[in-house]
Image (cartoon, rainbow, N blue to C red):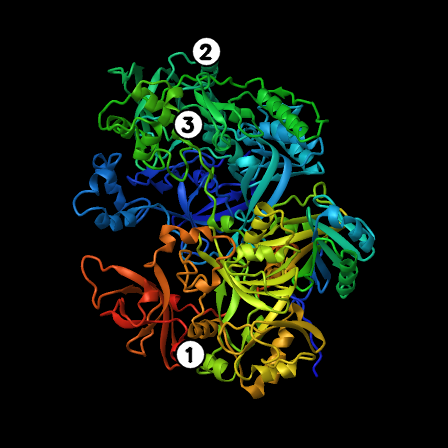
């Protein structure tokens, strides 16, 4: 019997580091999508999580090793350390029994790319149209937005001058974004990265 | 190197850094801080270009982006070459090479100049009048195209890289002249986020174009003041000064586009490959201040395009910024006061002043006194009626203006090597107009100025028609403070700079839109970019093009790469005279972005080459790459199409894969299929309304194929949905349709049926999917699964079971897109690659063969399964597909009502059928039209359908095809003909779609 091997979406990449910016994947984070009306599930969810769900745009809530990210009026992403998603799922599922809700494990759907360092905002400004200035985007905020041509969630942690910009991205977009982030960081010393999608295409009409 | 027209001292050039450059094949010297134009002038070179239409020699008219004619080809015959660049804006660097353009064989002797001799045959509208007749436009077009254009586009891939960046700010200021600097300083002092953009390398604007010491501001020389203010702005915590930055586009909601040149000024060898050449800034600003200055207009008189005729302000620019004397014996021609300063400055710098010619009979006495004191001859009420000189002006013919003609006997020839002209200053309102701001014509300044803002904007300084320096500074400072206040920053510094300029000249103008001419054959150019003369405007009006927008297009006035910066307002003035209509009623043409040209590289930014577009890959992607698969793009996904072995071509690989999948064991990476988790007590009812078939009785553990229609009743997606539990379903969609289907479902759930308790969440990439197909698949499944018996008897078709593989929880679906015994394993994506490898290893003894999307397409065609998007095109109903069984009669669903519309209910609609060519070796080309007769007939053969899918089937050893044919369902066995572009149509017969049953005898 061979042991199953888990591979993260960016397993083929090494972290990128320059003086003022670094890029790395935080793989296998536990992630659960929670849908439900706050009036219906708010109380039960709060008691299971240990903190109320965030209730307004851009807000996040932290309870122990769980971070709840507000994605919409009835939509949250719960992020927890690798491996904890099953236990969290069971606990929440039990607490929410009988209510109208949807709890979905999306830990394999998404991965996290962390861009850190003093130049992190400058690097990501090249790919995102939202205001990344510390006056507008503060640690603890979550934004659903577009990065280059991919949908992402941007979760900010760290401090104002040493932010950690965490992009939560679809696994199939991860390599595309990784390479564009490296390209954006080239002036700060990040090494260029070639996307994996450079493959032979069968295009008889163009030959 | 010898620079005969360089002054011994002064200017903002660095004399310790001499620069060698080439122009038109000759080597010259200049200094760091020069532009190509200033360095050429320092070497006495005025003739730098040939004009667009008549190939007339053209010189350097202006000193910035307004210059219409001094266009050159930078770095010719290299990958970096760029055509039509203004010599006035190219910063000189060591080794720069610029070529003359639009001339052959040389700039000095140009065959194309023959056009000028025959110019009276090329009036406005020449193309429209000439080339529509005779052999017609299609014939003439290639000759016209060969002679069109100015420079040459690069032929190689651009070696530089570019990027976009985005910023939000409180105050964006465009232009760092005195007004812009004052505004930026006031705004920056509040702590607001401020961006000041300046198109040249140096802030300062007009303050740098005057003699050092002419003006003091706050007790400092103007140049020191500029330096101090810049430092103050840059020291502010949230302010930034962007130089070499062209603010070119003002869009809705104060969204502004700027192009910053980061490396264009550096010698090629010193450019940093890790930095972009240019950066496109997208700025969203709370408030925008336009301090874009004013643009000087030339005067329209015979011979006004001769090299050596320059704008008076530009002459001051070269004199004071670059320490260049553009001519040793100069004349001035003006209709306003400002050009007199040029005369005084030239004289002071050591030039001989031949004359000041002022078109006004009553030029101010104070100016005349100063001219007299300097010993400069003055003629008022005078015009220039012609110029002499081939590659540079030698003399100007002048005469006294008498109404609309020249007084007889007043002609006089004035020898000069420079004629500095000024027709007045037009506020540079291009960006203001782009913002939808309204203009008004102001007689006092003879120009259009901002009247009403449309966005959060203020225009200040000369751009606002304010020409007095102290007033510019006050206006800028007030606007900066106000902009910051609007953005929520109150405590702006209220200090207004104090100006001392005892010899400043007040601006005063009496317009003279075109000067009288002596001879009928004389030509005066309004637009020196597109070679439009004042007579062309006369002609346009005579031919009925009276609206300013029509006259512009008919004559091409203002339509060059310069966008008419020096020509538009003169054109409006001349039209007003021709039509005898006041200028405000003539109006202005529309200003559009970009304010000045932007490179395609900057527009594309970093989204080029391998980074152009996301290519989504599955968790198993590398496994396909490793065995040499070729791929296709589906949506944004890369999917393995076939897996050719050594020596195999595409078709051979395809035949092998499909044979193996039916006779042994095939494996497909199906991870890209869209997957949606659907949950809620009304989930079942929701599905029943969304799908055309019935869903109320599907029990947990079972799956069903579903068809989704749009409101028109047309099929738009399909897939299999499994019941996980009574309130929980797992839907699959097509790969390309996944995002659209989820949006569609959310739209209905949120807006049409908010009463239904149902939630939807995409799980497309949560699961990696391996689809196993073929008679040996059960044996492999038995080895893989920890805890599930895959026997088709106990685990029947169209059911699903949870199970484990090596302890990993999986979902196994007994569904098939090939008509063969199949299992689809859904495993958490992180284990996708491992599962693929595991199946390959365990399956070896069962003959496992990976097959790609092409094989999948072929196999499903053998089974007669439709591919939405290939066999359908948005006009196909389930009835057309022969899938009446998937249309329920018992309940309503999206699209149901449309199926009874007369057109959708027709029985002769194009219907989905099989097609078997008479010759089994012929694969009917996909897309071929189907006709009813053996031969095409004239005039047009009725087309009764077309081929949607077509393959050589390895399992039936003959070709098979699918198509849409009018009334096809009732024409089984009938012959049709498939159009063949290479010969007679192929004969084929109509058959049912399920070839497994038709040809293979499957039940």
Q: Is residue B952 above or below residue B867?
A: below
Question: What percent of the width, then of the height, locates residue B756?
Answer: 62, 50
Disc assigned to residue B746? none
Q: Are marks 3 and 1 in contact (CB under 8 Å)?
A: no
Disc 1 is attached to a residue of which chain? B
Query: Can you identify the residue that label 2 sits on?
Result: B365
Q: Is residue B305 above or below residue A66?
A: above
Q: Earlier in the sequence, mark 1 or mark 2?
A: 2
Q: Nearer the viewer, mark 2 or mark 3?
A: 3
Q: Nearer the viewer, residue B213 or A12?
A: A12
Q: Secondary structure at mark 1?
A: loop
Disc 3 is attached to a residue of which chain? B
Do callouts 2 and 3 point to residues on the same chain? yes
Q: Which residue shows up at 58% across the image and 45% down it?
A: B751
Q: Nearer the viewer, residue B790 or B84?
A: B790
In the image as oriented, which residue stretches furthest toward the bottom?
B845
Do callouts 1 and 2 point to residues on the same chain? yes
Disc assigned to residue B649? 1
Quadrant location, the C terminus of chain B: bottom left
Q: Secondary structure at mark 2?
A: helix
Q: Earlier in the sequence, mark 2 or mark 3?
A: 3
Question: What percent of the width, then of the height, locates residue B547?
Answer: 33, 27
Q: Is residue B443 visible?
A: yes
Q: Is residue B217 above or below residue B992?
A: above
The Cα–Cα distance between marks 2 and 3, rounded to whole angstroms, is 24 Å
Q: Is residue B428 left or right of residue B907?
A: right
Q: Earlier in the sequence, mark 3 or mark 1?
A: 3
Q: Nearer the viewer, mark 1 or mark 2?
A: 1
In the image as oriented, which residue stretches furthest toward the left?
B134
Query: Can you identify the residue that label 3 sits on?
Result: B297
Query: Mark 2, residues whose alpha carbon is within 10 Å: few (<14), some, or many (≥20)?
Result: few
């Amino acid at each position: 019997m061979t042991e199953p091997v888990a591979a993260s979406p960016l397993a083929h990449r090494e972290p990128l580091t320059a003086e003022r910016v670094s890029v790395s994947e935080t793989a296998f984070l536990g992630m659960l999508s929670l849908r439900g009306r706050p009036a219906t599930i708010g109380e039960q969810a709060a008691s299971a999580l240990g903190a109320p769900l965030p209730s307004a745009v851009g807000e996040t809530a932290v309870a122990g090793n769980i971070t709840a990210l507000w994605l919409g009026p009835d939509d949250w992403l719960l992020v927890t350390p690798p491996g904890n998603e099953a236990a969290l799922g069971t606990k929440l599922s039990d607490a929410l029994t009988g209510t109208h809700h949807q709890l979905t494990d999306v830990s394999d759907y998404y991965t996290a790319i962390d861009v850190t360092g003093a130049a992190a905002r400058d690097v990501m400004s090249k790919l995102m149209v939202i205001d990344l200035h510390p006056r507008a985007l503060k640690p603890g905020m979550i934004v659903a937005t577009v990065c280059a041509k991919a949908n992402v969630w941007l979760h900010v942690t760290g401090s104002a001058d040493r932010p950690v910009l965490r992009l939560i991205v679809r696994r199939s977009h991860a390599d595309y974004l990784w390479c564009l982030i490296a390209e954006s960081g080239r002036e700060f010393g990040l090494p260029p990265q070639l996307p994996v999608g450079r493959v032979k295409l069968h295009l008889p009409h163009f030959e | 190197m010898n620079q005969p027209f360089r002054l011994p001292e002064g200017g903002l050039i660095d004399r310790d850094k001499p620069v060698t450059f080439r122009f038109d094949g000759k080597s010259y010297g200049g200094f760091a801080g020069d532009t190509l134009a200033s360095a050429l002038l320092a070497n006495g070179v005025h003739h730098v270009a040939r004009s667009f239409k008549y190939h007339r020699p053209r010189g350097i008219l202006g000193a910035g982006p307004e210059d219409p004619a001094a266009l050159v080809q930078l770095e010719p015959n290299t990958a970096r070459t760029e055509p039509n660049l203004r010599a006035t804006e190219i910063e000189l660097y060591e080794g720069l090479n610029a070529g003359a353009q639009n001339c052959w064989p040389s700039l000095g002797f140009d065959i194309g100049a023959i056009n000028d001799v025959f110019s009276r045959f090329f009036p406005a509208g020449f193309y429209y009048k000439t080339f529509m007749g005779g052999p017609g436009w299609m014939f003439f077009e290639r000759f016209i195209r060969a002679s069109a254009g100015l420079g040459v586009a690069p032929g190689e891939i651009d070696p530089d890289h570019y990027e976009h960046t985005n910023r939000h700010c409180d105050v964006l200021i465009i232009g760092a002249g005195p007004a812009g600097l004052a505004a930026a300083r006031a705004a920056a002092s509040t702590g607001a986020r401020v961006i000041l953009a300046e198109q040249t390398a140096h802030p300062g604007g007009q303050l740098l174009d005057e003699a050092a010491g002419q003006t003091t501001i706050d007790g400092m020389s103007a140049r020191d003041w500029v330096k101090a203010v810049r430092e103050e702005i840059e020291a502010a915590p949230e302010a930034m000064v962007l130089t070499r930055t062209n603010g070119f586009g003002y869009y809705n909601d104060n969204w502004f586009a700027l192009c910053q040149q980061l490396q264009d000024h550096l010698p090629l060898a010193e450019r940093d490959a890790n930095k972009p050449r240019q950066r496109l800034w997208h700025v969203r600003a709370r408030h925008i201040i336009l301090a874009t200055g004013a643009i000087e207009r030339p005067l329209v008189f015979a011979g006004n395009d001769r090299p050596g005729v320059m704008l008076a302000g530009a002459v001051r620019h070269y004199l004071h910024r670059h320490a260049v004397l553009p001519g040793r014996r100069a004349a001035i021609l003006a209709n306003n006061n400002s050009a007199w300063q040029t005369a005084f400055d030239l004289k002071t710098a050591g030039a001989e002043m031949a004359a000041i010619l002022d078109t006004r009979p009553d030029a101010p006495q104070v100016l005349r006194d100063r001219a007299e004191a300097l010993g400069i001859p003055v003629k008022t009420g005078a015009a220039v009626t012609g110029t002499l000189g081939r590659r540079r002006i030698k003399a100007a013919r002048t005469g006294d203006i008498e109404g609309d003609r020249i007084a007889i006997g007043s002609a006089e020839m004035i020898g000069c090597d420079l004629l500095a002209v000024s027709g007045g200053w037009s506020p540079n309102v291009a960006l203001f107009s782009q913002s939808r701001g309204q203009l008004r014509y102001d007689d006092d300044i003879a120009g259009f100025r901002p009247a009403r803002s449309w966005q959060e904007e203020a225009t200040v300084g000369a751009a606002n028609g304010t020409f007095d320096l102290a007033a510019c500074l006050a206006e800028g400072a007030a606007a900066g403070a106000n902009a910051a206040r609007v953005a929520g920053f109150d405590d702006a510094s209220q200090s207004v700079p104090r100006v001392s300029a005892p010899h400043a000249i007040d601006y005063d103008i009496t317009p003279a839109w075109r000067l009288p001419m002596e001879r009928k054959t004389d030509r005066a150019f309004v637009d020196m970019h597109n070679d439009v003369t004042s007579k062309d405007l006369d002609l346009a009006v005579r031919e009925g093009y009276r609206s300013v927008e029509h006259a512009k297009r008919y004559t091409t006035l203002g339509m060059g790469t310069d966008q008419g910066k020096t020509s538009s307002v003169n054109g409006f003035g001349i039209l007003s005279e021709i039509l005898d209509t006041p200028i405000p009623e003539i109006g202005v043409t529309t200003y559009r972005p970009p304010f000045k040209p932007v490179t395609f590289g900057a527009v594309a930014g970093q989204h080029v080459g391998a980074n152009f577009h996301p290519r989504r890959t599955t968790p198993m992607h590398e496994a396909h790459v490793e065995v040499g698969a070729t791929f296709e793009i589906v949506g944004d996904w890369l999917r393995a199409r076939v897996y050719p072995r050594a020596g195999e071509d595409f078709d051979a690989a395809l035949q092998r894969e499909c044979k193996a999948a039916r006779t042994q064991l095939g494996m497909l990476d199906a991870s890209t299929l869209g997957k949606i988790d659907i949950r809620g007590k009304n989930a079942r009812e929701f599905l029943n309304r969304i799908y055309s078939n019935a869903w109320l009785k599907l029990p947990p553990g079972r799956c069903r194929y579903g068809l989704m229609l749009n409101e028109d009743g047309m099929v738009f997606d399909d897939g299999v949905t499994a019941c996980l539990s009574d309130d929980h379903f797992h839907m699959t969609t097509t790969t390309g349709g996944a995002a659209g289907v989820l949006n569609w479902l959310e739209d209905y759930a949120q807006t049409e049926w908010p009463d239904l308790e149902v939630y939807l969440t995409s799980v497309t990439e949560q699961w990696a999917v391996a689809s196993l197909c073929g008679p040996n698949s059960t044996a492999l499944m038995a080895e893989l699964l920890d805890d599930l018996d895959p026997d088709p008897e106990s685990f029947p078709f169209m059911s699903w079971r949870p199970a484990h593989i090596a302890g990993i929880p999986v979902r196994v679906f007994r569904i098939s897109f090939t008509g063969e015994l199949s299992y689809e394993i859904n495993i958490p994506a992180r284990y996708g690659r491992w599962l693929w490898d595991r199946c390959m290893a365990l399956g070896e003894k069962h003959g496992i063969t990976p097959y790609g999307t092409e094989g999948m397409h072929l196999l499903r065609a053998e089974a007669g399964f439709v591919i939405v998007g290939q066999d359908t095109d948005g006009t196909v109903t389930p009835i057309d597909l022969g899938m009446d069984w998937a249309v329920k009669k018992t309940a309503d669903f999206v699209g149901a009502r449309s199926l009874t519309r007369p057109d959708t209910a027709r029985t002769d609609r194009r219907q989905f059928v099989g097609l078997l060519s008479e010759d089994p070796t012929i694969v009917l080309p996909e897309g071929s039209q189907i006709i009813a007769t053996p031969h095409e007939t004239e005039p047009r053969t009725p087309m009764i359908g077309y081929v949607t899918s077509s393959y050589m089937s390895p399992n039936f050893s003959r070709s098979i095809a699918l198509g849409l044919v009018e009334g096809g369902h009732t024409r089984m066995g009938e012959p049709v003909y498939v159009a063949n572009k290479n010969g007679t149509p192929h004969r084929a017969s109509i058959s049912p779609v399920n070839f497994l049953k038709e040809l293979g005898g499957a039940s």
